[in-house]
Amino acid sequence: MMAVALMIIAMTMLGMQVQGQEITRDGCDITKGCFSEPDSCPDPASCNFFLSWRLNADDDNVFEMTGDASTYVAVGFSKSGQMRDSDVYACTDNNEVVRSRNTVSNVNDPSPELKGVSDVSVSVTNGRIQCQFTRQPKLNNDNDTNYYDLSAGSMYTIIMAKTSSGALQNDGNIDYHYGGQVQGSRPTDFAQVDSVGADQLKTKLQKAHGSLMIIAWVGLASLGITMARYFKPFSSGTKICDQKPVWFAVHRFVMVSAFVFTAIAFIIIFVAVGGFVDTSGQDVSGRSRVTHAIFGIIVTILAIVNPIMAIFRPHPGEPKRPLFNWAHRIVGMAHMSLV
C-alpha cells in the first residue's frame, strides 16, 4: 500500500507525465500525417508546434500535439486560414481539452460544448504541453454548424496557437494568446496521410511590416522632425550644391523615405492578412486588431497628405505661407501621435 501511495504522489508531482504515450515522428508520411514548426525540428520535443493525425479502426481522427507552452496549446481547423472561423481545440494546464470561443461580439458568450471528443490525455512537463485526443469526424443528428466535418475530402487549414502567460479564464475557456500563432501552408485533408509545413511567408510579411514601420517612424521621421525643429538655426546658411539648406535637404530626404517605407508596409500587411484586417482571436484581441487597422489607415493617409501639401507649399514671405506652416506642423504632430 505504501508503494502505491508513493507512486500516486510521484505521478501528481510530475504533472501526470505518465498520461498517454510520448509523441514522436514515428510513422509520419507512413501511418499518420504531421505538421511542425519549424519544419526542420528533428523531434516533437524540439518543435515550437507539432501536430499529427491518423484514423483509428472506427475512422475517428486521432490527434497528437505538443508545444513549448505551459498554459495551453491549441489547434484550429480553419475554412479560410483565419482563426475567426475555426473549430478550435485547446489542451490546457488543467489537464483537459476545451473548445475555444472565437468571437469578438460578446465576451460573455459561453464556451462551445465539447462534443465528439474522447480518449483525452494531457500532460504538462517542464513548460511543455503534450496532448492526445480522439475526435469524431462529424456528428450525426446535431445542429452544431461550428463542428467541422473532417471526413475524407474535407479540406481545412491548420492553425496552432500557444501561450504560457496565464490565459485561462475561470470557466476554463482559453483567452487570447497575443502572438504564438502559426498556420499551415495549405489546406489539409485529415483523413489522409500527409505532411504540411508552416506558412512562413505570412510570418515574414508581418515581421517585414512591423520592421518597416519602426524604421519609418521611430528612426526616419524622428530624425526629420529633429532636423526641422532644432537644426534649422544652425545650418540654414549651409547649402548642399548651392541649392537647399542642409537641414531642409536632410528633412526632405528622410521624410520622403519614411513615406516610401510606410507605403510599402501598408501594401505588405494587406497582402499578409488578405484584406482589411484579420480579426482572428477572441474578445478584446479582435477589437484591438480592428483598432490597429483603422489607425494604420489614418496614419497612411496623413503620410500622403503632408508630402502633397509640401509640394504645393507657398514660398517664404507669401501671405499663405504661415497657413501652410501650421497645417504642415499639425498634420505631422497628429501623425506622430497616432504612431
Image: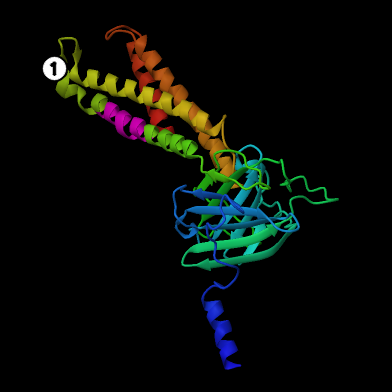
In the image, 233: left or right of 270?
left
Check residue 220 for magenta coloring: yes
282, above or below 263, in the image: below
- In the rendered image, residue 279, in percent from the top left (x then y), is placed at 59, 39
Check residue 186 for magenta coloring: no
- In the rendered image, residue 227, in percent from the top left (x then y), is placed at 24, 26
260, above or below 50, in the image: above
- In the rendered image, residue 335, in percent from the top left (x then y), is placed at 41, 28
212, above or below 177, in the image: above
Residue extending farthest to the bottom is 1
Foreground pick, 27 / 41: 27
Q: Quadrant of the C terminus?
A: top left
Foreground pick, 160 / 194: 194
Question: Which residue is painted at 66% across and 50% down in the image?
Answer: 101
Magenta-highlighted stretch: main secondary structure? helix
User: Would you call the spot at circle 1 few (<14 residues within 10 Å), some (14-19), or many (20 or more)?
Assistant: few
Label 1 sits on residue: 238
The stretch in magenta equals 214-226
Question: Which residue is painted at 47% across and 54% down in the image?
Answer: 47
Q: Quadrant of the N terminus?
A: bottom right
Question: Which residue is painted at 54% across and 58% down in the image?
Answer: 26
Residue type at the position of mark 1: Thr
Residue extending farthest to the front is 30
